[in-house]
Amino acid sequence: MTQNMSDIYYNGMNSWKNNDYINARKYFEISYNASEFKNDSLSKLLQIDLREGKYNKVRKLLEENIENQTVQMKQVYGLLENIENNFEASKKYYSACMVDPKMQNKALLSIAKLYIQTGDNEVARKMFETLQLDNYFKIQSTIDLICLNILEQNYSDAQSLLKGIDEKRLTPKLYQHYRILHMYIQYFQGKLNSSNNHFDPVKDYMIYRLFDHNEEILLNHIQKHMNQRDRDSNGCFFKYIDLKKLLSDVRERIEGMNANHFEVSDMYRFQLDTPIGFKGDDITSDLCVVTMIGTKDIITMYPVLLSDKFDKEGFSISKELMHKRNIGGKKR
């Protein structure tokens, strides 16, 4: 039985590595019942729910396992609190992860990102620069520095850092991210134009949107989140929802909000007055809106499920944070 459960767990890991979260969930839900794989399986199930925007489910699972707070679970708690705009609570969980020597620099990287959220950019910068000295974290901390410079419109610094990355060391996923960073920097420096480059509106969507702000292209992209077959995994909008009206309402809503910075994207999460779609069997009024970093230019939006502790610290509409970010985010 143990050997069979071991195979199930590693099948889950293989599915996870291949971004096949539907099958990964099936395997981890089985291996969760074996004591030797319980914690690792739970950690992966929580991460899948985070990726699928089921934040209420993540919080519920964490609270149900409150007596068994492993370092991995504290890390998930830290990420959940970050996503739900509770930056101080997030910092406490990441700090608690540092009791494990193997987790110290990983926790420091996460805390550095939190300092960007709270507008303490220079503190974050120094932490990233320190983490660059660790070969294991060199690439990721450099990427985070690049994103910070893009946020601050320091494109020359961002370009210099990007040139220092050895492309040959990058995984296919990281290389795609590297390519997007390169294109963004080139665009904002005025060195990238659509006439000399042929971007696919599907494959190169994030880059394509830099040049083409056509409303229909945006709506066509958002319509992908109306696929009812995704209801049980990523969720979906109602089949007959008026996306044009929703988009208009959303644009007005995010004007007075602070974004949650995530690398080269900004995310706005909030609850609407009426339901908009499904997450599994749950009907939800909660939405995530993604814009280009440092702008209100919408890239996409999709339904999520926020927990009852979402934005308890009030950062999403804090005027103080907005002012602090404006001061700290000025071009150096």
Image (cartoon, helix red, strand yellow):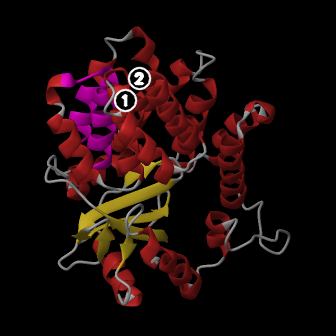
Counting from the top left corner in percent of width and height, residue 248 is at 36, 84
Q: Is residue 205 visible from the viewing direction of this image?
A: yes
Q: CA distance from mark 1 to mark 2?
A: 5 Å
**Which stretch did the figure color magenta?**
68-94
Q: What type is the residue that disc 2 sits on?
A: Leu
Return the residue nearer the eye: 30 or 94. 30
Q: Is 269 above or below relative to 125? A: below
Q: Position of residue 3 (x, y in %)?
A: 48, 23
Question: Residue at 47% across / 32% down in the picture?
Answer: 9
- Residue labelled with disc 1: 111
Tell me the quadrant of the picture where the N terminus can be found. top left
Left or right of residue 308: residue 299? right
Q: Nearer the viewer, residue 240 or 264?
A: 240
Dominant SS of magenta comes to helix
Q: Nearer the viewer, residue 147 or 99?
A: 99
- The reply to whether callout 1 and callout 2 are in contact (CB within 8 Å) is yes
Instruction: Give the amino acid type for the residue marked by disc 1 in the picture.
Output: Ile
How far across and down, in percent of the image, does residue 110 sit? 40, 31
Q: Is residue 315 magenta?
A: no
Give SS at disc 1. helix
Residue count near mark 2 (Cα–Cα under 10 Å), binned few <14, some 14–19, many ≥20: many
Image quarter for residue 238?
Answer: bottom left
The percent coordinates of residue 21 (x first, y second) are 49, 50
Which residue is the extreme one toward the front?
Answer: 1
Label 1 Cα neighbours within 10 Å, binned few <14 / some 14-19 / many ≥20? many
Vertical placement of residue 241 versus 297, above or below: below
State the mark number for residue 95: none
Residue position for label 2: 108
Q: Is residue 80 magenta?
A: yes
To which quarter of the image does residue 14 belong?
top right
